[in-house]
Image (spheres, rainbow, N blue to C red):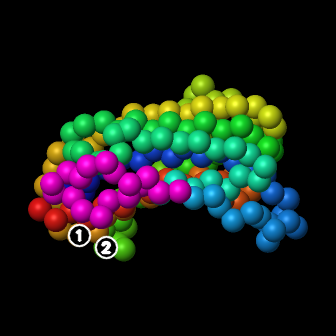
Amino acid sequence: ATQMLRYMVFFVTVALAVTQPHHQRHHVTPPLCFSIPPPALNPHLTNQTWRICGNFDHSTFKASVVPRHISFGKAVNITATFTLGVDILAMQCEWKLVLDGIILFSGYSADVCQRHFAHVKCPILKGDTVTLHATKGIPYVSLSKGMYAFEGTCFNQDKALIGSVNANFTWIY
């Protein structure tokens, strides 16, 4: 079952860092979040939403998910574009799959600047515009009924929150 979950799990994080001095962390602007409802639901799914958050002082942020509904065996394309208001030092990203509040699988922390998004070179300077994109899919497998969440989070070099991407859905088949 664990091996099946490894094949099933997907996560794409599309977020860039905000550098906050240690003494100013309690003044960090609350994350900017928006949800993307799906235009249509897989017949086995209900209550599905995408939630994308970014903690970006003086930065602009746009993102899209196409198609907006999770479909097993088909790819989801996620794109995010940032015009930065601060310098970026590093991006460490993690992901996990959760079922009814229980972590089923956790991914390893990855240095986005060096690995999966190798075209992103850090540091990234204030005023730069950066676009991140990825295509991920979930093979069709048998899932237990329940409320699932794919959760991904990125952190700055000093472990301050950068941003997150979540896909929440209930499997009812």
Q: Which quadrant would the C terminus be assigned to in this image?
A: bottom left
Q: Residue furthest top?
A: 119
Residue drawn at x 55%, y 39% is 80
Residue sitting nearer the eye, 12 or 49: 49
Circle 1 Cα neighbour tier, 10 Å, few/some/many (<14 / 14–19 / ≥20): some
Q: Residues within 10 Å of mark 2 (few under 14, many from 20)?
A: few
Q: What element carries label 2?
A: loop
Q: Give the range drawn in magenta.
A: 34-50
Labels 2 & 1 near each other (Cβ < 8 A): yes
Based on the picture, tell me whether residue 35 belongs to the magenta stretch: yes
Disc 1 target residue: 146
How much space separates mark 2 and mark 1, taking CA atoms? 6 Å
Confirm whether residue 7 shows in the render.
no
The amino acid type, in three-letter code, at marker 1 is Gly
Give residue 21's position: percent from left, percent from top.
Answer: 85, 59
* Residue 76 showing in the rendered view: yes
Vertical side of 6 occupied by 76: above or below: above
Q: In this view, does 33 lie above or below 75?
A: below
Q: Which of 79 and 113 is in front in this view?
A: 79
Residue holding disc 2: 100
**Of residues 67 and 99, which is closer to you in this image?**
67
- Residue 39 in percent (x, y) is at 31, 48
The residue positioned 80% from the left and 44% from the top of the image is: 86
Image spot of residue 137 (x, y percent): 30, 39
Circle 1: element type: strand
Please identify the quarter of the rendering in which residue 130 is found.
top right
Placement of the N terminus among the 4 image quadrants: bottom left
Q: Going by the picture, which residue comes out furthest to the front? A: 39
> Does the magenta portion include 41?
yes
At x 59% / y 42%, what residue is drawn? 62
Q: Which image quadrant for residue 105? A: bottom left
Of labels 2 and 1, earlier in sequence is 2
